[in-house]
Image: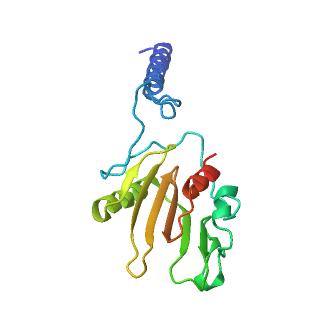
Amino acid sequence: MAPRVKRVAAAAASALCLAALVACAPDPDAADSPAPGTPTATPTRTAAPSPSPSATGRAEIPDDCRAMLTPGVLSQLEGVPLNDPAFGASGPQPGGGLICVWRDPAADTTGLVTTISYMSRGPALDMLNQLVAEEGFTCYTPVGGTRCEKTWPNETYPVTDGRTLFWRDDILIDTRYSNLAPTGYTDAVVGAIFR
């Protein structure tokens, strides 16, 4: 085959491959805008859903536990100490994570601990699916991520304990709480990270 014919054939093959890739690319607005008549997500006890990673780039974990919360959430935490040394390592962590401990060392059970860390899709979804299968967590897919949660009665005190996890774009927000569940807390953290 003549060199010119080879170049033309190679160019045609490249254009065909590019067209095939573009045709398979998802519509970036499709995930954010449900079709008319589509029901909103409701909690289920099936396997954790698998949202597609964001194409907007990697989100960053904040380094300030207060700054990522809304005034309304902060008002519900008023008077609760943050990151008291009695609870060990908290605040910004090596590797870019963040631990926020809202708890009075004198309290028997009341408190909330949020650990935010980087975790890739495979391990995160494996962990969430395990929580569904083995511990009865409920999962759903709000704001482009996967959220799993469960509450239960405290074994010692007449209060409610719980855990809420949210994963999106290689960031896991994991909150465990006992008798302290500010309304809108997880939504505020998610909103601060994935603006």
- Percent of width and height locating residue 102: 61, 72
- Percent of width and height locating residue 173: 52, 60
- Vertical order, 110 against 162 (above or below): below
- Percent of width and height locating residue 182: 57, 62
Residue at 55% of width from left, 67% of height from top?
114
Residue at 65% of width from left, 74% of height from top?
80
143 sits to left or right of 44: right
Pick the front one: 7 or 162: 162
Pick the front one: 153 or 188: 153
Residue 179 visible in the current orientation: yes
- Vertical order, 56 against 112 (above or below): above
- Percent of width and height locating residue 31: 48, 34
Pick the front one: 115 or 181: 181
Quadrant (top left, top right, bottom left, bottom right) of the N terminus: top left
136 sits to left or right of 13: left
82 sits to left or right of 124: right
Instruction: Specify the color scheme.
Output: rainbow
Residue at 40% of width from left, 82% of height from top?
156
- Vertical order, 37 against 31 (above or below): above
Toward which corner of the image does residue 103 lie, by quadrant?
bottom right
Residue 70 visible in the current orientation: no
Looking at this rendering, what residue extends furthest in the front direction?
158
